[in-house]
Image (cartoon, helix red, strand yellow):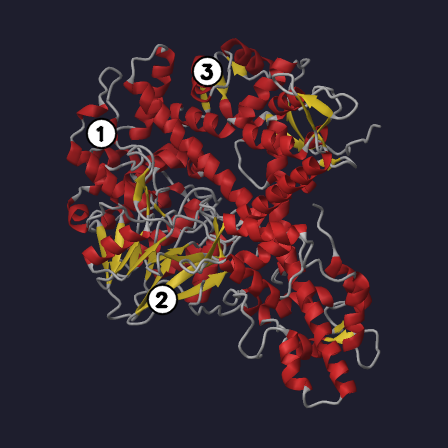
Amino acid sequence: MFSERWLCFCCPPMHKSPRRTIVAPIEQNPIQPESRLQLQTSRLSNRQKQKSELHLAAVVIIQTWFRRRRALFEIRRKTAWTIYQNIEYAGEQNQLKLYNFFLELMQTVSKNPRDATVAAKVLRRSSSLSGLTEELELKQLTSPTIINVESSYQGPHIDKPINREHFEALILAFQRGELLHAHYVLLILHELRHILKNLPNINIVSTHQTTCVTVVGDLHGSLADLMIIFHKNGLPSNENPYIFNGDIVDRGFQSIEVFLLISVALIVYPNNIYLNRGNHEDHVLNLRYGFMKEIIHKYKSHATRLLHLFENIYSWLPVASLIDDHIFVTHGGISNITDLTIINQIKRQKYVSVLSPSFIIPPNEDEFQIGNIPNDLLLEWRQILDLLWSDPKQSDGCEPNTYRGGGCYWGPDVTNDILEKHKWSLLIRSHECKEEGFDYTHDKKVLTVFSASNYYAVGSNRGAYVKVITNQPPLIVQFVSTKSSHKSLTLWERVSHVEEQAIQNLLEKFSVNQNRLIREFAVVDRKKTGRISINEWCDIVSRVLNLHLPWRTLKSRLVQTDSDGSIIYESTFRFKQLQFTLNVPTSERRTSLCQAIYRNKDLLETVFRAIDKDNSGVISMKEFTDVCVSLGHHNGTKFDGKQIMDLAASIDLDKNGVIDFNEFLEAFRIVDITDHFDDES
Amino acid sequence: MATSTDATGAVPDQENRVTLRDPIRESEERANQARIKRLTDAFNVFDQESNNTIPSTELGTVIRSLGLVPTEGELQDILSEMSDDSNPDSIHLERFLNVMNMILKDRRYQGEPESKILRAFQVLDTQNNGYLTEEEFRNYLCKEGEPFNEEEFQDFMTIALDDETNHKCTYKDFVQHLVVEEND
C-alpha cells in the first residue's frame, strides 16, 4: 500500500519497509519448495537431493512459524489500536451529541425551564467568552501592561523587536520546564495577532526561493515531538519554511509552550512560517480537551485574560494554505461544496468558534430561531466547518453530519471533482491519528500527516512530517519521541505497552459500569451459577459500554473462563474499582449514582467549566445540581437532584452554597484492587 | 433455550407435534456457528471501514491470528481462491467465510509439532553446536526458502538471540517461543 520511499534520518530500526504482499519475493524464483527443488535437484545425486530437500524444508518451517508468531503480535497491536480509536470516537460522538442536544433544547419550548437555562448559559458561553468584539475593549482587557513582572521571576524575558535570540531562548527555557510569564505571553500573542489580521484566509506559499516547505500535522501540545521535528528538520527560518496544519493545542500538557514557539517563529519569520487553523483552535473544544485546564492551572489569576485573547486569535488564523498553486493544505479536508472563490471572500474573524458560531446563539434567552438564519450564511459556515472537520472515506459520495455536527465524510469522487475544479494535484490534511504518522488515500491524491507520536499510549503510533519539494513527490519523514530510554523499542515491547494501556482503559470502563453490567448478567444467569456463555458476555459488554470491539479476541485478557468455556462474570470487576471519598455507608443507589457521575465525568467537567464564567473553579450549588439533572435528561441517566446534593454535602464540599467542582470530580477515582480474584468452588 | 424433552430426546413443538432431535446435526450446527463467529471477529479487526472487506495484504495476518500456520505459498493459494477479479486489492467477508470455514473444518494448515520445529533447527545446525549464529540465520532465512525482509529479520533476531552481545541463538529454548499458543 505505501510504496512511497521515505527516509528516516536517525532511526533506521524503526521505519517500516513497504508492506509485504503475500507473493513470494522475486529474487528467489519459485514459491513452492517442491518446484524449486525440481530445478536444483536434477543436478544432484540422490543423497545430496535428500539433504537439500530436508534443508529447504527446515528453512521454510522456521520462516513459517516465525511469521505466525509475528502475526499474532500484529493482531494484538491492531486490536489495541481499535480500542483506542473506538474510545476516542465514542468520546467525540458524545461531545457532538451534547452540543446538538443543547441546541435542540433551545429550539423547542422546553417542558423543563431549568434545562433551557442551563443550555442557554452553556451556549452563550460557547459563542464567545465575553462577547468582546471591540478592538479597544480587547486591547484594554488583555494588554500586557496590566501585569507586572516581579523581580523574583527567573524565566526568559521577551522584548520588542522579537528576534531569533528570543526564539532560541524560549526553546531552551521550555525544555527545562520553565513557564513564560503571563506578561510576555500577552506580548507575544498581541504581536502574533497583529500579523494574523493582515493575512488572507488562505496562505499563499511558494517554494520558488526556498525549494521546499515542511508541513507539520497535529501536535496536540506535544513539545517533545516539536523538538524532534526541529532537530531532524532544522529550526524554522527564511531558508527553512514551515506550515503548521492546526491542532497545536489540547490533549497534550504543553500546549501553550508549543503554541508560543510556533507564534514566535511566525513573528520572527512572517514570510516563511504559516499557520492553518485546526478544529481544536476553538475555545469550545478547549473547554473539554485540556487547553483551558492547562492555562488555568499554569496561569491562575491571569488565565481569564489569556483565554480571551486566545479566543480572539483563533478567529484570525487562516483556514488553509496553497503551495505553488497546486497543493492544498488544510486541517480537516474538503466536501462537495468546497470552493476557494467563496472561501476567499469570507470574513473569517466572524467565526470565533467554528463549531458554534455566534450567529446561531441568541444574545438573550428569549429569541431563538435557527430557521431564520439565511441560507448563504449557513453555506458559508459549512465551507469553513468542512475545511476544519471533515474526514475522507473509501466509498464515493459526501455525507454531512449535520451543520451543527462537524464537517463531512467525503469520498474519492469528491476528491477528483474538487481537485480538478481548482487544478490541484494533492490535498494534504491532518486531523486523524495514523499508526505510521501518515497515510495516503483516494488514489494518492489525499495525504494525511499526523505529528503527535505515541498519541494514545507509548508505542501506539509514529509521528511524521512532509517535505514538499519543488517538482518532486513529497518526502515523508517518520519519528517517535522516546521520553526515557534512548533504545528504540522492539516490536514486542511496543505491542506490550500499547496493549497494556488499552486493556487498563477497558477494565476501568467495566468498573464504571459495574451495576448496570451486573444487572444484565443476572438477567441471563437465571440459575445463579455465576457463569454465562461467551456470546452472552460479549453481547452485554458491547451493548452496555456501547463499544463495538473484538470482545472475543480480548476476553482472555479481561475475564476468567471456566473449564467448560463459560465466563465467570464476576471476574470482570476483579482488577479495578471506582472509589470515592465518602465516610457514610454506601447503598446500591449511591454506587449507581457515583458510577453514573464518573461515566459522564468529561461531559460534566465541560459544562461546569462553561458555566464558571470567571474560571474560579466554583459554581453555585443550584447550578451544579441543574447541570447534573439536565445532563441526565440528555443521556437517559437518572441524576436525582436531591441525591446529588446529598452526595456533595457528604463529601463536605458545599461551602456556603457554592461548590468546587474540580474537588467534587476528583473525589471519584478508579483504583487498582490489589487482591486477586479468589476462585470459590 | 431449555425445552422439556422426554427420554428419547423428542421435543414437542407449538402444536404439540413431536419431532426427533438430531443431536449430531445440532452439535455440528453449533460448531459451525462458533466457527463463523470466530472467523467474523478476526476479519472485523481489519475491516477498517466496516464495509465487510479487508485489504488483501492483511489476509496473512488474519489467517495466522486464527492459529493456522500456512506458508507464504499456501497463503497465495488461499488468496486466489478468495479474491475477486473486479476488486483484487480487497477480500469480501462472504468469500472469506466460505473458504475459511472449509479450511477450519478440514483442520488444514495446522502446522508441525514442536519436535519437528526443533528438528528443523538441528538440520540447519550442520556443525551440531546446539546453537546458530546471526550470520548463519541471515544466510538461511534471508536468502532461501521464503526469505525474510530486513524488518522481519530484525524482529526475529530480537527474540532469537540469547542476549544482545553474543550473537548466538540456543534454539532449544527458542523453539518454545515460536510455538506459543495465544489464549483463545
Residue A393 horizontal/vertical position (percent): 37, 48
- N-term mark: 3 or 2: 2
Crowding at dot 2, Cα within 10 Å, few <14 / some 14-19 / many 20+, comes out as some
Q: Which residue is mark 2?
A: A474
The secondary element bearing badge 2 is classed as loop
Q: Which residue is mark 1?
A: A359
* Picture coordinates of residue A479, whole percent (x, y): 50, 61
Q: Quadrant of residue A673?
A: top right
> Do the CB atoms of the residues marked 1 and 2 lie less than 8 Å apart?
no
Residue at label 3?
Answer: A629
Q: Earlier in the sequence, mark 1 or mark 3?
A: 1
As displayed, is residue A200 above or below residue A588?
Answer: below
The reply, left or right, for residue A375 in relation to residue A278 is left
Q: Position of residue A86 (x, y in %)?
A: 50, 40
Q: Nearer the viewer, residue A667 or A569?
A: A569
Amino acid type, mark 3: Val
